[in-house]
Image (cartoon, rainbow, N blue to C red):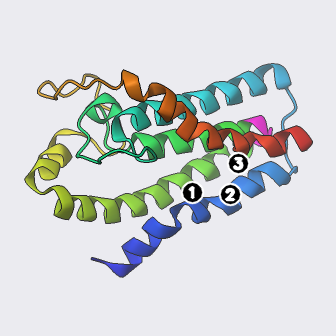
């Protein structure tokens, strides 16, 4: 196990915080057109939150249940829907903060941080789940979703996890709180 990769994994949330704070509190070059910017930022934020909830319904990461290799839901299309959701959320916050010029910086910061994180996770999950995970890596793209789901994926009953998944992801709404005071 590569120690630098593990450090990226452990610090993945903290490494994004400076970019989030910059987007919230730096006001040079702000665009002030709330009729366009705020709906766009809200849509991006909600898409990211929805993707995280959908992934949580299948992954059960924050839920008290036995964890297994997840091959259903958004994982039929892409390997890292939670990190894609995080990126959409943070880009949405950046847009809501009217700092449109900073959107590419946020995308690059998320992309680099989550890519380094995934390099550790893929090794860890290969050791944990073996050949099943290796086959998943071969079938499902890392970042750009497939247009159609993997054909031989098992069916999942995730409906019973909807409400617990929503509750588990409510903390994401706290990212919006500073916007109301700026």
Asked whether, in this view, residue 178 is left or right of residue 133, the answer is right
The answer to whether mark 3 and mark 2 are in CB contact below 8 A is: no
Q: Which residue is mark 1?
A: 109
The answer to whether mark 2 and mark 1 are in CB contact below 8 A is: yes
Decide which of tag 3 and tag 2 comes sooner along the chain: 2
Residue at x 16%, y 39% (from the top left corner): 139
Q: Name the element at disc 1.
A: helix
- Mark-to-mark CA distance, 2 and 1: 7 Å
Near-viewer residue (63 or 44): 63
Near-viewer residue (100 or 86): 86
Main SS of the magenta part reads loop
Q: Residues within 10 Å of mark 2 (few under 14, many from 20)?
A: some
Residue 18 appears in which quarter of the rendering? Answer: bottom right
x, y (%) of residue 145?
Answer: 33, 33
Residue 91 appears in which quarter of the rendering? Answer: top right
The N terminus appears in which quarter of the rendering? bottom left
| Image height of 116 relative to 78, above or below | below
Residue furthest toward the front?
64
Residue furthest toward the left?
131
Start-end of magenta stretch: 96-100
Residue furthest toward the bottom?
3
Residue 143 appears in the picture as rendered: yes
Asked whether, in this view, residue 122 is left or right of residue 14, the answer is left
Q: How many marks?
A: 3
Question: What numbered label is drawn on residue 19?
Answer: 2
| Image height of 37 relative to 12, above or below | above
Residue at x 68%, y 38% (from the top left corner): 173
């Amino acid at each position: 196990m590569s120690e630098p990769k593990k450090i990226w994994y452990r610090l993945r949330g903290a490494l994004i915080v400076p970019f989030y704070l910059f987007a919230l509190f730096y006001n040079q070059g702000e665009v002030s057109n709330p009729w366009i910017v705020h709906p766009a930022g809200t849509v991006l934020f909600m898409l990211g939150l929805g993707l995280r909830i959908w992934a949580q319904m299948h992954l059960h990461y924050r839920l008290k249940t036995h964890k297994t290799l997840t091959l259903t839901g958004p994982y039929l299309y892409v390997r890292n829907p939670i990190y894609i959701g995080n990126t959409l959320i943070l880009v949405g916050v950046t847009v809501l903060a009217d700092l449109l010029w900073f959107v590419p910086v946020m995308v690059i910061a998320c992309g680099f941080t989550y890519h380094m994180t995934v390099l550790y996770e893929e090794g860890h999950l290969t050791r944990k789940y073996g050949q099943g995970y290796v086959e998943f890596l071969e079938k499902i793209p890392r970042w750009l979703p497939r247009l159609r789901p993997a054909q031989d994926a098992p069916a999942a009953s995730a409906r019973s996890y909807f409400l617990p998944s929503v509750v588990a992801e409510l903390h994401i709404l706290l990212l919006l709180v500073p916007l109301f005071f700026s």
